[in-house]
Image (cartoon, rainbow, N blue to C red):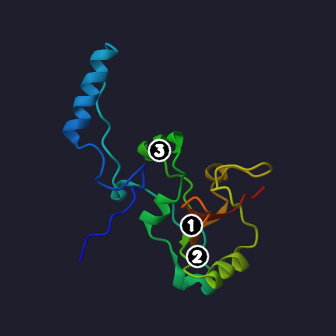
Amino acid sequence: MRPVKRRSFWGWGYEGAGPDDAARARLAQSLAERFARADLAPARLPRIEEIALPVPRTRAPAALAAIASDDPWERALHTYGRSYRDAVRAQRRDFAHPPDWVAFPTSEAEVADVLDQLGTISPDGGSFSPGRTPFSECGPRSLSCVAHSPFCDGWGRDLVLFHSRCAP
């Protein structure tokens, strides 16, 4: 059986696919020389074991239990999008507002179940849409989850649905 590649929870690409420590050290040295900075050193890459995620505030509804997970790695992976700003936050180990759980529907009926259970859905990847609070800035009183669909948006990307309700 082949090992399954997992996406990096803190940045772009797959776990272990980026530059190794020696290459990262060479890059830091090159940048330090270029910009006359002796204090540049590569940051240590985050490991899921060292990320202190808040305890989930809510559990997935019983109707979604078979397709939902509150696994720390999944919650960390879905805390942010994949923008540069999000990657920097994750590199700094800032996972203050992760989703409480993640759903993985595998059929149209399961997608409908997720939508029925959650009510209001933000289809913008959780980052921002007019009239909504940014997903990562809802604060500790928000309820959240993420749903991945087996369907794609026509550009080869997974359809991702975020649910977020910020308390006043």
- Specify which label sits upstream in the sequence, 2 or 3: 2
Secondary structure, mark 3, is: helix
> Is 119 on the left or on the right of 51, as rendered?
right
Image height of 117 relative to 17, above or below: below
Proximity of marks 3 and 1: CB atoms separated by less than 8 Å: no
**Residue type highlighted by circle 2:** Arg
CA neighbours of label 2 inside 10 A, class few (<14), some (14 to 19), many (20+): some
**Residue type at numbered disc 3:** Ala
Which residue type carries mark 1? Asp
Let me know if residue 105 appears in the view: yes
Q: Of helix, strand and loop, which one carries label 1?
A: loop
Residue at image point 52% right, 59% down: 78
Q: Is residue 103 above or below residue 66?
A: above
Q: Residues within 10 Å of mark 1 (few under 14, many from 20)?
A: many
Could you tell me how far apart the alpha carbons at marks 3 and 1 are, in whole angstroms? 20 Å
CB-based contact (under 8 Å), mark 2 and mark 3:
no
Instruction: Write down the residue under mark 2.
Output: 59
Quadrant of the rendered image containing residue 57: bottom right
Instruction: Give the residue at mark 3.
Output: 87
Residue 105 appears left or right of 74? right
Q: Earlier in the sequence, mark 1 or mark 2?
A: 2
Q: Position of residue 158 (x, y in %)?
A: 55, 64
**Could you tell me if the residues under marks 1 and 2 are in contact, i.e. CB atoms within 8 Å?**
yes
Separation (CA) of disc 1 from disc 2: 7 Å
Instruction: Determine which residue is flagged by label 1.
Output: 100
